[in-house]
Image (cartoon, helix red, strand yellow):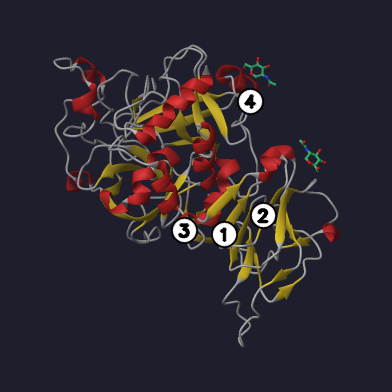
Amino acid sequence: MSHKLLMHCSYFFLFAFLNVDLCRTDWITGVRDIHTVYKNGYREGKVKAVNVALNNKSYTFQLTEDLEIQAFGSISLDCTSEVSCNQLNYPEPNQDGQCIDGYIIVEDSYGSQRIGCGAMKFGLPIRPSRNGRDLYIQVKGKSLSSQCTITCGETRTKNSKDYYTLPSNRHSGIFETKRCTCGRKNDGAGGGSPDHIVGGRNAGEFEYPYMASLVSTGTSSNICGASLINDRYVLTAGHCSAGVVNNPENYQLIFHAHLLDLRRNGNFLDDDVPAGSYGSIKEAKGYNLPTKTDADEDRLRLNIEKAVIHPLFYQNYQRTGAIIYDVAIYKLERRLNLVHSEYGRLSTMCLPKLGTSSFYDGDSMTVIGWGRPREDAGASNRILQELDVTIYNQTDCRQQLGEDSWLHVSFCGGFPEGKRDSCQGDSGSPSVHKVGKNHYEQIGLVSWGRGCARAGQPGVYSHITELNEWIHHTTQDAVWCSRPQST
Ligand SMILES: *[C@@H]1O[C@H](CO)[C@@H](O)[C@H](O)[C@H]1NC(C)=O
Ligand SMILES: *[C@@H]1O[C@H](CO)[C@@H](O)[C@H](O)[C@H]1NC(C)=O
């Protein structure tokens, strides 16, 4: 049954105005051909992503064309990706020692890398540094009759003499400044009453200084949520992002917003609400409030330079319709100044520490978003909503969803009785976990669910600790704010 539902969701990409049921976005702006997306999303369609370690299988590839392979491990399987190749033959480096015409680059998320060309012999498998799990292997040019194998190395405690570890102090790959801190929540002015999306409560005005809304250029109606994670990038859901990858100029991000517009004209409001039946809109928080301009709310509206979707999202989605690795990164048109001019109004959300794998069974997290107030509501909430939900353990989650393969990179949040949940329009929105006094970490983002707030159907969230290496790898030129001195 679940498989059918999952397949149903795949129509989302292929046809307009079908299934907004599973993916938690109302974003359906036209027909999207997944193959085109695949092609444009990655360098000329020559990227292959393989998930070796989750399947715990090895993957062998021939070095006969330009290729980028990404291998992912999983801490829950206690294994680390590693790559070994037989002899490679690339053109010799130039006089400056640079590999120009052909090379292999093996990198990890920490910025450690090894570049090789000329005639090379791999004596030992290469592993990431510092307990990393992911390896990114780029190959340029042919190296005929050579092949490499990516495997799930046995355990991370294995004797380091048995493999070549990428140099960890080459450069950190992560630039962090102590001049700003992440993970802060502002005191909400207005809203924030203790009763606490579906069944949520109004967030305080500008309570969440990292929260962003994805909108069509020039509009102020929410498509998906996103969170600011450093001075240049936001994090959102993969399934929000096919159109953004292809045409980033058609989309913008709005920061420092509280009251957005209802969606009209060419969006779901006109198509989804039965004629004469606008009753459900009235449940949308703030449906009758006057429109606010960017200036009214002192919003910051930024263009998107480029969007990147996790390569394994398409892979799995195309093959099976499964929504996993549901994460994307958007690069903003410019760096934000989080130390001076923009600090105060905006700040970043902390991510869990790179290299950690955490489950949060039974804990509470807060999910924030402008999504619908009810599964069948005709509109999103206009006022940003917040809701505390309980995180399910993996056994429970698996039992509810009837599937297990995605649970390394997703988790469930909600309540057995339903009633309160994230919903369409919340996709990509962050869910945050309290770490200390005014110190939060983003541990999830809204991915999908069967309906909204149904009993026995928790919301499914992308699991940030399991995606963190890719997030860091994809944002290597960013400056991160440091974590608060936790109390
Ligand atoms: C994964 O493969 C390694 C090496 O073949 C093996 O030692 C380990 O037991 C496997 N782990 C699982 C969870 O299957
Ligand atoms: C998972 O959560 C359920 C419900 O809270 C509980 O009954 C069960 O014992 C938990 N299982 C594990 C393995 O923690």
Q: Amino acid at mark 1?
A: Leu
In the image, is 415 to the left or to the right of 340?
A: right
Residue 22 position in % (x across, y down): 42, 25
Disc on res. 43 = 3
Mark identifier at residue 67: 1
Q: Give residue 46's position: percent from left, percent from top.
A: 51, 56
Check mark 4 vs ligand 2: CB closer than 8 Å? yes or no. yes
Q: Amino acid at mark 2?
A: Phe
Measure the alpha-carbon separation of dots 3 and 1.
9 Å
Q: Nearer the viewer, residue 212 or 270?
A: 270
What type is the residue that disc 3 sits on?
A: Arg
Q: Which residue is tagged 4?
A: 394
Neighbours of disc 3 within 10 Å: few (<14), some (14-19), many (20+): few
Looking at the image, tell me whether mark 3 or mark 2 is earlier in sequence order: 3
Location of residue 106 with respect to 155 vertically, above or below: below
Compute the Cα span from label 3 to label 4.
35 Å
Q: Decide: marks 1, 2 in contact (CB < 8 A)?
A: yes
Q: Are marks 1 and 4 in contact (CB under 8 Å)?
A: no
Marked residue nearer the N-terminal end (4 or 2): 2
The image shows residue 463, relative to residue 156, as above or below, that is: above
Mark 3–mark 2 distance (CA, rounded to whole Å): 18 Å
Which residue type does callout 4 highlight? Gln
Camera-nearest residue between 104 and 413: 104
